Image: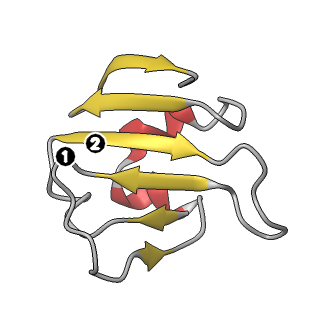
Amino acid sequence: MTAVPGWEKSERVALARALEPEAGDSGWLIMPPGAVSGVPPEQFPVFELLRRRSELLSAMALPGGWVVEFEEDEILGYGKPG
């Protein structure tokens, strides 16, 4: 997983999954709203979500190319952009 700094403390986050992730990469990106560019993202194994924000695990079954938005532990919406 790749996560933009601030995701752990943000009540609202979006998760986007790459359509074709590279080998050894889950393809998931976690972003808080208003994420600052230029700050290096954090990378960690998917299983770390169990400890850090287990409510986001429900999105992990979505296929590549999908995005899901959470507010705290609730899914606000999901879909395939484009």
- Residue 56 drawn above or below residue 20: above
- Near-viewer residue (80 or 46): 80
Q: Quadrant of the N terminus?
A: bottom right
Please indicate whether residue 9 sits to the left or right of residue 23 in the image.
Answer: left
Q: Residue drawn at (41%, 53%), measured in percent from left and top?
A: 30
- Dot 1 and dot 2 residues touching (CB under 8 Å): yes
Tell me the crowding category of disc 2: few under 14, some 14 to 19, or many 20 or more residues within 10 angstroms, Cα based: many
Q: Whole-percent x and y of residue 41?
A: 39, 76
**Quarter of the image holding residue 64?**
top right
Please name the amino acid that badge 1 sits on. Pro
Write down the residue under mark 1.
Answer: 33
- Colour setup of the view: secondary structure
Write down the residue under mark 2.
Answer: 13
Label 1 to label 2: alpha-carbon separation: 6 Å
Q: Residue drawn at (79%, 70%), measured in percent from left and top?
A: 24
Residue 51's tag is none
Please indicate whether residue 41 sits to the left or right of residue 57 in the image.
Answer: left
Please name the amino acid that badge 2 sits on. Val
Q: Whole-percent x and y of residue 57?
A: 51, 40
- Near-viewer residue (35 or 73): 35
**Quarter of the image holding residue 5?**
bottom left
Q: Whole-percent x and y of residue 52?
A: 35, 59
